[in-house]
Amino acid sequence: DAGITQSPRYKITETGRQVTLMCHQTWSHSYMFWYRQDLGHGLRLIYYSAAADITDKGEVPDGYVVSRSKTENFPLTLESATRSQTSVYFCASSDPGLAGGYYNEQFFGPGTRLTVL
Amino acid sequence: RKEVEQDPGPFNVPEGATVAFNCTYSNSASQSFFWYRQDCRKEPKLLMSVYSSGNEDGRFTAQLNRASQYISLLIRDSKLSDSATYLCVVKALMNYGGATNKLIFGTGTLLAVQP
């Protein structure tokens, strides 16, 4: 099916474990993003990618690693999970389009609810 | 000061009411503005872009006031299905002022439309 998907949708893990959240989009959008959403903070950007093999830090990158070897995939890895990383994680994609990026829409995946015990 | 600030609400309104949300942004050089809608436990989705001249989409009207650095969303004739969190969003700028594809989200305003 076309669109943007995330897996797993729910994950419970323990402190110190490595966790990888997957994101896949079928639109061939050049930009992809990872956000976390927490009560009182709204959506905060963790990492983003402008194209395959090009990634950059967002507002809250510490403790996370990303890669983008293929345009359609943008996995997010928590190298050693901490309780403060308990959150809802959203992946999104967008394409600069003809407007030069001013009004282009970001499309979000359904989210992954991660609990770190 | 947060880059994008919104009243968290909740706004509890009866069906048929008109409700308005405001949002302020801190960077006077910001160029692009949006309202996203997020249903409970779902992903955010674009509701509408906000243009300088103001724009309307059915029962929804968005306005931009650059002098005061605020954005508004007006919902007329509220429906039960309008119940959601409304996110004010501003596109981030690069250090030199160029546009980016990064978005800055407000924390959202919760709207509950009552029957």
Image (spheres, rainbow, N blue to C red):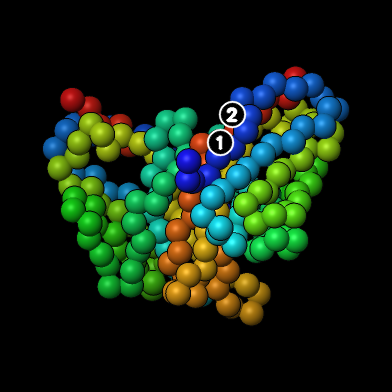
Which of the two residues, A22 or B82, is positioned nearer the viewer here?
Answer: A22
* Host chain of mark 2: A
| Mark 2: amino acid | Arg
* Host chain of mark 1: A
Residue pictured at 62% horizontal, 33% vertical? A7
Q: Give the numbered dot on residue B26.
A: none
Which of the two residues, A77 or B23, is positioned nearer the viewer here?
Answer: A77
Q: Can see residue B104?
A: no
Q: Give the numbered dot on residue A9.
A: 2
Distance Cα–Cα, label 1 vs label 2: 6 Å
Instruction: From the viewer's perspective, tell me whether residue B71 is left or right of residue B101.
Output: left
Horizontal and vertical percent position of residue B17: 16, 39
Residue pictured at 61% horizontal, 25% vertical? A10
In terms of image quadrants, where is residue B53?
A: bottom left
In terms of image quadrants, where is residue B85?
A: top left
Instruction: From the viewer's perspective, tell me whether residue B86 is left or right of residue B17.
Output: right
